[in-house]
Image (spheres, rainbow, N blue to C red):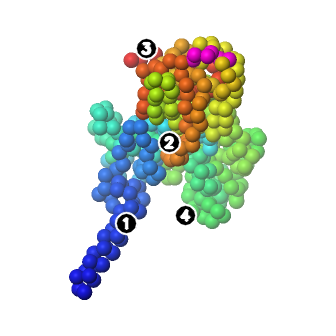
Amino acid sequence: MRKLFTLLITVAVSSSLMTAMAAEPQYRTDDGTNKKLPWFKLVSGQFPPEGSAHYIQGELIKIDHPERQLVIRVDRNDSQDRGVWDLPLPLDMLPYGSIYYHGAPAALCDIPLGTHLHTWCYLKGEADDRPPIAVFHDRISPESAFRRCIRVEDDFSYRMRQKQVWKIDSVNLEKKKLLATLMQDGKPVGGSKSFDLFGRTRVYQERGIGTLESLAKDQLVQFNLTWVGQYGPGRITEIYLDDVSRKLVTNYQMDSHRQHIKERGLPAWVDAVDDKKQLVTFTFFDGVDPTLFNDLTKINPEPIGWPATLFGKGGAKDDLAPKGTMAVARESLMTYDPTNDRKGGNILKFNKVPVVPGCSGVQIQLECGMLLDGFRPTKIVRYYPASWPFITIPMEESAFGRE
């Protein structure tokens, strides 16, 4: 009887441990309690799990728009020694990494230098031997190992996504100070904070421009910041006083994003290739306006300005199937010469796949008239629906000649 009791206890404890192990990821997370666990390492051709990235805040101090690279000055926090305050951190956007500005998808070139950003990052690859940026007597940011970025947001986008808004407690125009409390679901989140205003703070009110005198107690506002943590909670660079102004700036950014993607193609990676049938299956990344995927199903038997030879064996008029072409891209999403090296044809299948960080959930299978060497599993491509007029992008955004 004693042996049976011991066996039951052992089974119960083992079951509890297995349940705990299944509930808690076996890698370190920002909100996890076990700081001895290793950080999650990215796997080629796989999207990372939710919550596996490391959250870092900082101010945008440099960008390379074509290469989707940025440098932030990391915010000060309680975990840092004074000697590592304000150090730079270079980041590479992952091919499936998304950028948001003013509550809508964006490109790095949309975000002004000096904007305070929220980023989610992963460890750099083992083969990445680039040294970190060392400044001020070779000081290096404690975050220097986190080089690969999956998401970037300005304060405006971050607060809107969290369904948070700032409530103005008071305004002192003489001292250029604004006292505000963060609100969520009508309740305060933390205490009141004192932000700096200055002469070039841009004030937006309804469909026009306001002034600092337009700021008033109890207004619910959104704003972007700079110099966060250096002299208090930060300086306000722009402030939106109402829903009308916020929706307007979001719509402007969304239109800019749609134009950007239509001129450069929808980014994706290749899942599978059938060489014999010349079929390529690929999954689109998230971070783009979902309405753009509606254009995948549009049928245009005579694509504007597109040679019929792009569409494979039957040409552009073989049937009324939705069509498109794709071009080989680098991990930065930069293409080589899409004017000449796009290949494609009919879309044969539309699939739904799980929506996880980096993945849109949209997958298609394309019949190609010719397979290029870059059309291989885990490789990056950009896709152009045939209903989109094709134009040549500026030369500096092309990888042709950079090899």
Q: Residue at x 42, y 21 (%)?
A: 373
Q: Residues within 10 Å of mark 3 (few under 14, many from 20)?
A: few
Residue that mark 2 sits on: 358
Position of residue 285 relative to residue 385, above or below, is: below
Q: Residue furthest left?
A: 3
Q: Secondary structure at mark 3?
A: loop
Determine the CA span between mark 4 and mark 2. Answer: 31 Å
In the rendered image, residue 239, in percent from the top left (x then y), is placed at 65, 46
Nearer the viewer's eye, disc 3 or disc 4? 3
Magenta part of the protein: which range? 312-317
Q: Residues within 10 Å of mark 1 (few under 14, many from 20)?
A: few
Of marks 4 and 2, which one's residue comes earlier in the chain? 4
Kind of residue sitting beneath label 1: Ala
Nearest the eye: 258 or 188 = 258
Nearer the viewer's eye, disc 1 or disc 4? 1
On the picture, is 152 further left or further right than 207? left
Q: Secondary structure at mark 2?
A: loop
In the rendered image, residue 118, in percent from the top left (x then y), is placed at 50, 46
Residue that mark 1 sits on: 20
